[in-house]
Amino acid sequence: MVIPVRKITDFNPGNRAFIKEETSMSQSKEIILTAKDLSKTFSNESVQQHVLKNLNLNVYKGDFTVVMGNSGSGKSTLLYALSGMDKPTLGTITYFVNDPGQKDRSDKNDGSRGIEISKFSNDRLALFRRAHAGFVFQQNYLNESMSALDNVMISGLLRTKDRKALALKAKELLARVEISENDHRKFPSQLSGGQQQRVAVVRGVINDPEILFADEPTGALNSQNTTNVLDILSDLNTRGQSIVMVTHTIRAAERGNRIIYLADGVIADELDLGEYAGDYKDEANPAREKAIARHRMLKDFLQEQGW
């Protein structure tokens, strides 16, 4: 599904009004996922907690979408629902992807009209996630009894039995995130926290997911490792990877081109930041002026939301 979207056509630092409407199909974005009237309620004895409330959202192919909001706003709940890790109480979640697993079913689909996953069984959801979604969490959840390479390959083996080709791909991806061959056979406990999270990112993308879901992926890292992991995510996005990331920090949010702000289970507002322009603190950054303007725009937006 393709619809026209806004594009930044004139750059005027400090002024959010520079965003103009573009209706040309060449400037349109493709919807890869849509949520309609999404609600999630948790029940505890006689108490019900309505975490998501009739929420509507489109996720676009190639976007780095960032979800922010105060604690308890429903950020992680939304991420789990969109990714198929949890089922919504009400509403629909539709993916616009080609799904080989549908080819022998009565509801087979070429991706043009979408695959509605909200009512899938748990087993079918697991198969769908395996084919279309990747995950990175705050905790890396690496298997402590497996090497770094095997932690990546075990996910890949869910999709292919060609171990030779998979090993080559895993090693190439690990090299891209600066995990050396000497570290491939190390166990997670023998790696630094930053190295472990980089391995976790590779595990998340080994199956070429349509969307990479990241839930506070730098929340447990120090400053330098945070930068390293964010650089990897930005690089993946530059290469075309669609990303949906939950974060509570401006530093991580600046990597996104689209900011969604949740408040009390609904989308309060959103901001189109445009593509990442590098570190606004880096005096050698050739796009520093734009980076500073993006930073100010994001801060102003979050202050407007009461963040």
Image (spheres, rainbow, N blue to C red):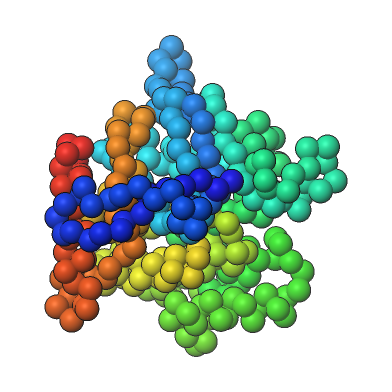
Quadrant of the image occupied by residue 266: top left
Q: Residue furthest top?
A: 46
Residue at the spot 54% in from the left edge and 44% down from the top edge: 33
Q: Is residue 43 visible?
A: yes
Estimate the x, y position of residue 187 in percent, counting from the top left. Answer: 51, 74
In the image shown, does 46 or 69 lie closer to the viewer? 69
Q: Classify 248 as above or below 174.
A: above
Q: Classify 114 as above or below 196.
A: above
In the image shown, does 92 or 158 lie closer to the viewer? 92
Residue at the spot 61% in from the left edge and 33% down from the top edge: 118
Residue at the spot 35% in from the left edge and 71% down from the top edge: 231
In the image shown, does 119 or 163 lie closer to the viewer? 119
Q: Classify 137 as above or below 52.
A: below
Estimate the x, y position of residue 87 in percent, counting from the top left. Answer: 56, 33
Estimate the x, y position of residue 138 in percent, counting from the top left. Answer: 39, 55
Residue at the spot 81% in from the left edge and 48% down from the top edge: 103
Quadrant of the image occupied by residue 223: bottom left
- Whether residue 10 sits left or right of residue 212 in the image: it is left
Tell me how many marks there are: 0
Q: Is residue 199 visible?
A: no
- Whether residue 178 sits left or right of residue 205 in the image: it is left
Q: Classify 202 as above or below 137.
A: below
Q: Quadrant of the C terminus?
A: top left
Q: Residue furthest front?
A: 24
